[in-house]
Amino acid sequence: MSTPERPVAAGSGAGGSAVGAGGWAVGAGGFSWPEPAGMRDAWCGQLRAADAGRRVRLCGWVARRRQHGEHLAFVDLRDRTGTVQCVVDGAHDLRSEYVLAVTGTVRARPEGTANPNLPTGEVEVGDCSVEILAQAEPPPFPVTDRVEADEAVRLRYRYVDLRRERMQANLALRARVNAAIRRAMERQGFIEVETPLLWTPTPEGAREFAVPSRMQPGSFYVLPQSPQIAKQLLMVSGVDRYYQIARCLRDEDLRADRQFEFTQLDAEASFVTQEDVHRFISEAVLDAAEAATGVRPPPIEKMTWADALDRYGTDKPDLRFGMELVDLTKQLAASEFRAFRAPAVKAIRVPGGGQLGRSRLDSLVERAKALGAPGLVWMRVAEGGDLDGPGAVLRHIGAGERAAVVAATGGEPGDLLLLVAGEHRTTCTVLGQLRVDLGRPPVWEGPHRYVWVVDFPLFEGIDDEGRPVAAHHPFTMPHPDDLDLLESDPLAVRSQSYDLVLNGWELGSGSIRIHRADIQSRVFSALGISAEQAESRFGFLLGAFRYGAPPHGGFAFGIDRLVALLAGEENIREVIAFPKTQSGADLMTGAPKALDARSLAELGLAIRRQ
């Protein structure tokens, strides 16, 4: 759970802009609310000093009631746009979260009583008549952002939790993001096509949710992990530019940034390069960010996977802060300290970290070991620029080497240097995690730093049978400069795949696909997939390719993650209306639940007790 000090997302109801004549309109990071209709003729949160003298009818919930004398009461009435104070005579029977219709006259508050913290704080509604539309039991927790309720209680009573300003703002922000994405994709010539939710099992790596067929007992559909194969078939069909705000499902363990069901922008285009795909997706993402925050981010920068690993120790770099990895292999090559005689020696500089106590330094050493490093060397930059640290290390490092280390890292007095030696990949990943542990700011702090990470390896390792393991799905096109290495040095082959990263969170992935039969056969062969196995697993896609597949590529990114970051939330549950808990439970409905015997029989299923 994020702290109460986290700023409310841009465009929150309490500060919405003036009402326009039409439907929704995107302004500087917020909504222009539409004209109210039905039982009301004004929004609570939109009344201002200019409305003084206007007779209005409002509808909403009682956010707060303050008794003033025997008969008079101040009632804060809340709808999704915000709250306004209503002065009510004889309000003894009004309680928190009662649903009311209030008719009254807007007037300036008496001198000295204005509330500068409330957008409607200069006015109140007086001469009120009140109609109780629905009574309410006392809510299970206060409906205010000033109080943090237990998350399990919030999820159990989600319909109450969603009334809070923070949650209303998050849902409104999500709606603006979705609308901006659709406009951007359609402006670029994409058409939205809905793909099936009942699909065939696909070997995409993640565990799938199975759906038993009542009409064909013993057979199953699966819920789609993504529309990957369907959208490639659409390219064969001549759709050319497809997109979908798609619901996808994966039966995986849940985390702060993962739910069983999630929403993604899914896109595919024909006759394109990866530069084209980056341009399409960047346009949609930057439009979404501008709609959410009112500020358009700068063009998205790019870096290679190898560069990201070397500089940040991860393929999901958070660019909001420094502490980049520094290579000290050359500076310490002649060191007498045996641990530094390794293929790679790298370091990070922790500004001001020299004040950390010995117990904290020891915990960093243990953390590095747990991450796979043989050890961790720490050094402080002392006054005068020399190094201070464990004697067992420093007595084996000459003055010239110490000076070279300080110069290479840019160390200043009071800084802490953390060094890891070993294989290049290990040194990078260990220091990359320590960098995040020590320097990463909260999600709501700092700028939004987007980066495309490109040129990922096509294969991520070797299995027990000596065959390369695909880093992505087996239809990812190899880099054209590395095709000659497919058989001779597969681990050196780069792919035409790419990720989009925001503040250390992977938003999504994509690639240029293989559309040529000869390249596909070589990749299958490298992976140990025979022609018979390929036909069994991918037959309907390969069969479609035989009828003329255009060069194509695509991308998908998680809308839940993007919205959470734009809203300044640590957990995507805060931007999903009805999420599951980390154990996969829906506390509000009680799902998952057992089926009765009749339903199981219709599906041809029986429960086997463990």
Image (cartoon, rainbow, N blue to C red):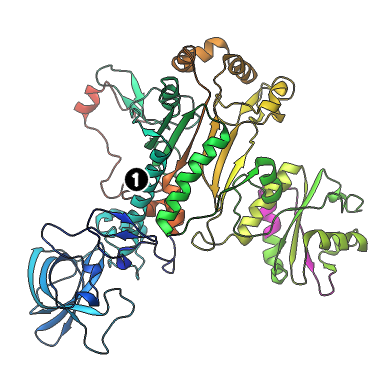
**Which image quarter holds the N terminus?**
bottom left
Q: Classify residue 362 by image quadrant.
A: bottom right
**Which image quarter holds the C terminus?**
top left
- Write the start and end of the magenta stretch as one range: 364-385
Residue 384 among magenta residues: yes
Q: Classify residue 22 by image quadrant.
A: bottom left
- Expressed as whole percent of the image width and height from the top left, the position of residue 179 reads 35, 47
The residue positioned 56% from the left and 10% from the top of the image is: 531
Q: Which residue is mark 1?
A: 585
The residue positioned 75% from the left and 61% from the top of the image is: 417
Which one is in front, 180 or 227? Answer: 180
**Which amino acid does the dot numbered 1 rest on?**
Ala
The residue positioned 36% from the left and 30% from the top of the image is: 223
Q: Classify residue 91 by image quadrant.
A: bottom left
Residue 469 among magenta residues: no
- Report whether residue 398 is seen: no
Residue 407 as seen in the image, left or right of residue 295: right
Which one is in front, 134 or 171? Answer: 171
- Expressed as whole percent of the image width and height from the top left, the position of residue 384 reads 85, 74
- Expressed as whole percent of the image width and height from the top left, the position of residue 572 reads 42, 51
